Amino acid sequence: MKAARLLPKSAPLVLLAASDREVIMKPAAFDYERPQTLDDALKLLASSDNAKIIAGGQSLMPMLNFRLLAPELLVDISRIDELRGIRETKGRGLSVGALTRHHEMETSKLVEERFPVIHEAMQYVAHLAIRNRGTIGGSLSHADPAAELPMMAVLLDAHLHVAGPNGLRQVAARDFFLGALTTDLEENEILVQVEFPGLPKRSAYAFDEFAQRSGDFALCSVAVILSWSGNFLTGGKKIGDVRIALMGVDETPVRIEVAEQLLSGAKHIDDPLLEQVASVIRDTIQPNGDLHASADYRRHLAYTMSQQTLKTAWQRLQGQTDED
Amino acid sequence: MSNLKTISLTVNGEKVVRQVEPRLLLADFLRNELNLTGTHIGCEHGICGACTLLVNGDSVRSCLTLAIQVDGAEVTTVEAHGKPDSMSVVQEKFQQCHGLQCGFCTPGMLATAEDLLNKYPLVTEEDIREGLSGNICRCTGYQNIVDAVAAARDEVRSQ
């Protein structure tokens, strides 16, 4: 196909006078810098009282368009190469650079092999156009109560690596999310990497999410990891490590430890036990009601989806017995 | 505003250098600075999908992207998908299946369909519907849009 000339040849394209152009600007005015290194980014961040970081911009841009935020300075970290990439760590873990895009995470063979639960959860993140640009670091720092990545971090006991003026520090995922859109990050800090420690060898997962439209924020989501412990040869095997995380039912993603403890040590999971665990989950969460679903409805979803998700994980875990 | 920055990018195969305010959205840049009004603006906060176009081959919401963020990138708008006498496969199928009524959502649908076809097998109708779920059509002509993408898939896969 012959490439047609698609731009007009001559220049007088600006139909509006400069003063009128103000009208079409959605965000309030800001300065913009695009540092090439983390050090420069931190310095820029410290140089202003009202600076914001932008990478993919898929959470920040709507807020700028609505003028919910009006930063003085936008620090675009999207070209800082040291913040990119998915790497293997010791003990079958993975470390994910903050600039990793959702679509990269969704299609990474490493992620699929080591953390199939993340692979599955990524299919539920918004729409392809958002996943193409949105970053892992952005989703974690934005901390929407109904976002999948923060939930995965909490489920998998991830460590978040944060860079600031005084160097690097690590925060456990469960201490990182403080409330809706609120994290442990200081104004002058940047989330640079998230580290997912490896899972026990014989473990199984299940994930489910309910939203009104595919790709919308979840009304309720449940993720489960079950692992075997004990000696397979002597018949002493029982459920060891248990993780149950829910999202969309509180200000932050939550782990339900009382429910986890009910399953840990069990040799078998039957329907009455599932019902008991699901009831505990339903009675432990503290969902808010909103336009999309009442608190009671979210509790009901949590109850039903927990049973189904645990059942799936248990069936998969039983399938693990004969291997190895 | 005086904090203008120079950006240089490729739009539909042509090099473009312009001075922009950092807060200028890519969608507004294309429409108002380059007169490329094929990119439609609907909700302006990433929900409706009308402004979806391709940046370096990936579908992207141009209302959730600053022009300055695509400095150095290659942007493809609906104006470059094809021409009336040489339409892209996806455009051809939209025409054959009557995949549009008013046409407002179509540029975004086309860009989304192109990217979906590149990245996913789209085996079932459900896959197509889920893939298109970020693009809203207020004529609600979804059935024909889904048919068009399925027809494009069959054509592309058979080649």
Image (tube, grey):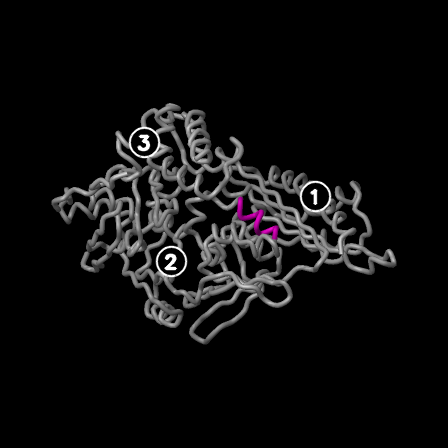
Which residue reaches farthest front?
B159
| Quarter holding residue B96 | top left
Task: Give the number of the mark in front: 2 or 3.
Answer: 3
Q: Quadrant of the C terminus of chain A?
A: bottom right
Tell me which amino acid carries mark 1: Thr
Task: Give the number of the mark in front: 2 or 1.
Answer: 1
Mark 1 or mark 2, which is nearer the start of the sequence?
A: 2
Residue depicted at x 35% and y 41%:
B52
Discs 1 and 3 lie in a common subunit? no
Secondary structure state at the residue bearing disc 1? helix
Q: Residues within 10 Å of mark 2 (few under 14, many from 20)?
A: many
Q: Nearer the viewer, residue A72 or A245?
A: A245
Q: Which residue is mark 3?
A: B104
Q: Which residue is mark 1?
A: A312
User: Which region is colored magenta?
Assistant: A116-123
Q: Spatial distance from mark 2 to mark 3, Cα to Cα?
A: 30 Å
Tell me which amino acid carries mark 3: Phe
Residue depicted at x 70% and y 60%:
A200
Q: Spatial distance from mark 1 to mark 3, Cα to Cα?
A: 43 Å
> Does residue A296 appear left or right of residue A80 in this picture?
right
Q: Nearer the viewer, residue A21 or A285?
A: A21
Horizontal and vertical percent position of residue B74: 30, 50
* Marker disc for residue A54: 2
